[in-house]
Amino acid sequence: MGVGDCTQNHHDQIDMTSPSDPILVVNNIEVIYDHVILVLKGVSLSIDKGGIVALLGANGAGKTTTLKAISNLLHAERGEVTKGSILFEGAEVHDLSPNDLVRRGCIQVMEGRHCFAHLTVEENLLTGAFTRKDGPAAIRRDLDLVYGYFPRLKVRRTSQAGYVSGGEQQMTAIGRALMSRPKMILLDEPSMGLAPQLVEEIFEIVRRLNHDEGVSFLLAEQNTNIALNYATHGYILESGRIVLDGKASELKENEDVREFYLGVGGEGRRSFRSVKSYKRRKRWLA
Amino acid sequence: MDLLNGIFIAPFVQMADAPDFLVQVLWEGFVSGILYALIALGFVLIFKASGVFNFAQGIMVVFAALTLVGLYQKGVPVILALILTMAVMGILALAVERFIMRPLVNQPHVILLMATIGLTYFLVGLGEFVFGGEPKQMITTELGLPTGSTEIPFGAQGVVILQHIDIAAAVIAIAMVTALALFFNRTRIGRALRAVADDHQAALSVGISLHQIWAIVWFASGLVALATGIMWGARSDVSFALEIIALRALPVLILGGFTSVPGAIVGGLIVGIGEKIGEIYWGPLLGGGIESWLAYMIALVFLLFRPQGLFGERIIERV
Ligand SMILES: Nc1ncnc2c1ncn2[C@@H]1O[C@H](COP(=O)(O)OP(=O)(O)OP(=O)(O)O)[C@@H](O)[C@H]1O
Ligand SMILES: [Mg+2]
């Protein structure tokens, strides 16, 4: 319970009616896979309208599970939210299908991109408009909008998505989500397997989408450094619990974060914090 | 020596001697090949979109044909009977989606296979209960399908006889395949179907409703079954004995690959034509009856060289 105090603060914040207007609130959820494997042990977070929030943590921390709990993709993996609540724009999402959620404006871009390999890039983008009812002209306009953000996709529009580069697939996956006219995108490890320069490019586009289109983002990332550069807030997840959260700028200065997530050395500390850090490092290595 | 002659020389001499007869055999093989292809196509649609091996596909052919004829015999006008039969196939699709696919989707494949075996016996029982078990005549003329035949002179004094119903079968099959191809490639739902076939999870994540897609593929496959049932019924009777033609679809699928529409078509034609030729030219040598296993032989030989089938793609991992 070394960092329980942070989590506690956080709960208090959510229980109080917060002054800003959250688009998504996750309240102390617990997730169990296969009826027995407890993976999330009380995760809470909140995202303001128009915010970019980073969800950070190592392999297996539960980032993907959290995102799938929100988008309701857990059922397909025999996972279940057993406690707590998730509110998207104030409405409980528990009984909504992924289809309903996409209609309401909350869409996930899955880890590992998951493009439709045998469909062309353009067809991939069009599948993102599946839930829309506003007609081909509006969809066409948004297709041009996506090509505006990702000019490379326009060049590759007729290529089968299975054969374009990893970066282009990531762009296709994000573009496909954009085609649903989302208010919020749950973006799972966009940096995975991409060269640093390309990662930068993708995050720049995330920032522009946030700024120009008003899309809110929840970003799951292992790449703490870049995620905190672009996010307004961050949450750090360890073994299914939020252990730390705060403004991105504050997290970047936090000694524990610097030491364990940003790889910046913090030698010579002899306070009680270092004891906690030591404990955490042990967990980290285990 | 006689045997070698019988296998390697005599059949070819026979073919060269009577080219009109050879063309006749090829044509008839082609027509049954088309029907095999249609049955296989029904399988492929369902397998692609849901990873389910639909054991009931053959029975759906019989069930559709039986419903059509049965309704007509009960006094329903033919057009209405046709529309009602399509509606029945639609209801069947919705029921399968609701009571088989949806509850069992996360179960192992073998459980879904079992469920379709269960569906097979359910359809046999239902069909016999409502319309009786005795073989029926297909209402070919009532449906406006042509009967009779045309003789086309071929070569010096030969003729090839084309049954009009066979020509109609070929035309309908081609129209059907074209319509399906357009549907798959040009429409929003068709695109979603292909997306589901590629990646279930990703399809879910962009808001494609799997329930809707499954109901649609089962319905499409039911319509293909109806067309097959009408054309097959016109060539023999409508009875549950027709079910065995479904067994022919298996070698077609092995040949064509379980996920390939062109594979189903080419595979169907290879099996249909190969079987006819084998039966006519090599059959007597083996004492006849080779039609029942030749298809499997052809499929096995192909398998040795192309285990993934003619047009096989990677098989989809179901969620
Ligand atoms: N379908 C599943 N069934 C059982 N356990 C699962 C399943 N999916 C994930 N888990 C377990 O849940 C835990 C959290 O996994 P999750 O994928 O959410 O982590 P993550 O933070 O996204 O990790 P990564 O950075 O590697 O993507 C892991 O221990 C994992 O083994
Ligand atoms: Mg993950």
Image (spheres, rainbow, N blue to C red):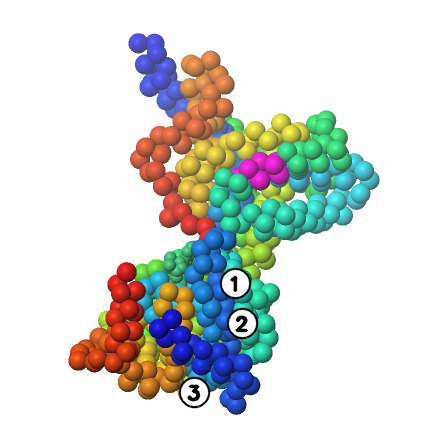
The quarter holding residue B147 reads top right
**Closer mark to the observer between disc 3 and disc 1:** 1
Residue A65, given in percent of the width and then of the height, sits at 43, 64
Say which label, 3 or 1, has the lower sequence index: 1
Query: Mark 2 and 1 residues: CB-CB less than 8 Å, in contact?
Result: yes
Q: Main secondary structure of the magenta part?
A: helix
Q: Residue at x 26, y 68 (%)?
A: A281
Whole-angstrom CA distance, mark 3 to mark 1, is 34 Å
Q: Residue at x 35, y 12 (%)?
A: B3
Q: Which image quadrant: the C terminus of chain A?
A: bottom left
Whole-angstrom CA distance, mark 3 to mark 2, is 27 Å
Q: Is residue B14 above or below residue B248?
A: above
Q: Which residue is mark 2?
A: A86
Q: Dot 2 falls on which chain?
A: A
Left/right placement of residue B180 relative to residue B18 reads right
Residue that lies at the very extreme toward the top in this rendered image: B1
Q: Is residue B197 above or below residue B274?
A: below
Q: Are marks 2 and 1 on the same chain?
A: yes
Q: Secondary structure at mark 3?
A: helix
Q: Secondary structure at mark 1?
A: strand
Q: Are marks 3 and 2 on the same chain?
A: yes
Q: Secondary structure at mark 2?
A: strand
Query: Mark 3 and 1 residues: CB-CB less than 8 Å, in contact?
Result: no
Q: Is mark 3 within 8 Å of ligand 2?
A: no
Say which label, 2 or 1, has the lower sequence index: 1
Give the label on residue A212, or none: 3
Q: Amino acid at mark 1?
A: Val
Point out the stretch of residues depicted in magenta: B113-120
Q: Residue at x 50, y 32 (%)?
A: B248
